[in-house]
Amino acid sequence: MTTPEITPLHEDVTFHGPLSEERAARLIRGLQPLDGSHVIDVGCGWAEFLLRTLEAAPTATGTGVDRDATAIAHAQANAEARGLATRVSLHVTDVQQWQPEKPADVVIVNGATQVWGGDPLRHTENALVAARKLLNPGGRLLLGEGFWEREPTDEQLGAMPVPRDQYRTLAGLVDFAHEHGYRLIAAEQASLDEWDVFENGHALAWERWLRDNPDSEHAGDIRAKADRQRGWRLRGWRATMGLAYLTLQAP
Ligand SMILES: C[S@@+](CC[C@H](N)C(=O)[O-])C[C@H]1O[C@@H](n2cnc3c(N)ncnc32)[C@H](O)[C@@H]1O
């Protein structure tokens, strides 16, 4: 049974996470000045945030790494179309096998602390430690990471594949970053609208495919995927799990 072609996520959402264009622009402004800076985006997906950062900083360079070849191909095409190809290098690589060409002034880890693998309870710590190794002294980390907006009930925890102790409260997450040597420059969080826009876009390709292929031998599998994701969202994390955007100063 061959895998059916589902439209890639970048066709339906701008960023691979709950992030509005307005917030993205503000986060990038908060990273200025970026003159002559090198920016590394780890788990960059199709690198839309990195490309926008470079558009806002004409003398900056960037590196994006993701193991998803389709996402990186889309990133590369966009970089070329937007005249950024000479300033950005994009790599299809597992981060665990990757060595940077040079240290960064800014590291972005947005919705991607899992890229260093291992126990989910250690993902945040892995990212905080790994980012410091990628940064020049005095560099900054833009961390997009989950946290509990409110304590999840047992019922919610049973309905989503996220262990309670993977995330902290927002204050706990910021304290944890401070324990790892960073200082908080700015904190904001995704709104429920941003989450809904992202989750709706996330489900759209499956629903479109089911509408267009009702008799396919794959319909059961695709419906099961869409139903599982909808359950995680509506019975699990919606309005309970947040995504924090922390701008962090490294020592
Ligand atoms: C939620 S997406 C975030 C993408 C991007 N940072 C953004 O905000 O649009 C997480 C990304 O991490 C990538 N990823 C997961 N594990 C990885 C690994 N071990 N090495 C490289 N990329 C990985 C996935 O392919 C995916 O693109």
Image (cartoon, grey):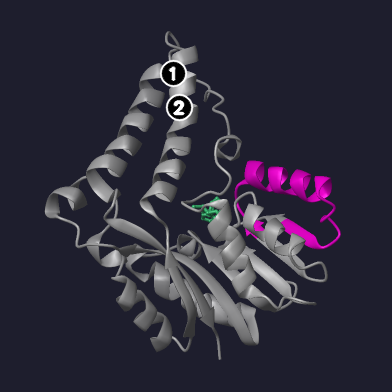
Q: As drawn, is 239 to the left or to the right of 245? A: left
Give the SS element for disc 1: helix
Q: Residue furthest top?
A: 215
Which is nearer the eye, 96 or 70? 70
Given the image, on which type of amino acid does mark 2 rest? Trp
CB atoms of marks 1 and 2 within 8 Å: yes
Which is nearer the eye, 154 or 1? 154
Label 2 beta carbon within 8 A of ligand 1: no
Q: Which residue is mark 1?
A: 210
Label 1 neighbour load within 10 Å: few <14, some 14-19, many 20+: some
Q: What residue do we see at 65% from left, 52% from top?
A: 48
Q: Point out residue 177 in the picture as x, y percentages from the top left corner.
A: 42, 81
Q: Which residue is mark 2?
A: 206
Q: Is residue 74 among the parts visible in the rendering?
A: yes
Of the four image quadrants, the one with ligand 1 is bottom right
Give the SS element for disc 2: helix
Identify the magenta region. 65-90
Q: What residue do we see at 68% from left, 77% from top?
A: 104
Given the image, on which type of amino acid does mark 1 rest? Leu
Residue 210 higher or lower than 24, as above or below: above
Q: What residue do we see at 50% from left, 29% from top?
A: 205
Residue 209 higher or lower than 159, as above or below: above
Q: Point out residue 245 in the picture as x, y percentages from the top left corner.
A: 47, 67
Label 1 beta carbon within 8 A of ligand 1: no
User: Quick check: is 79 in the magenta stretch?
Assistant: yes
User: Quick check: is 40 in the magenta stretch?
Assistant: no
Q: As drawn, is 176 to the left or to the right of 78? A: left
Task: Please state, as top left, top right, bottom left or bottom right, where the C terminus lies in the image.
Answer: bottom right
Q: As drawn, is 159 to the left or to the right of 46? A: left
Q: Point out residue 166 in the picture as x, y percentages from the top left corner.
A: 31, 65
Q: Point out residue 130 in the picture as x, y percentages from the top left corner.
A: 53, 76
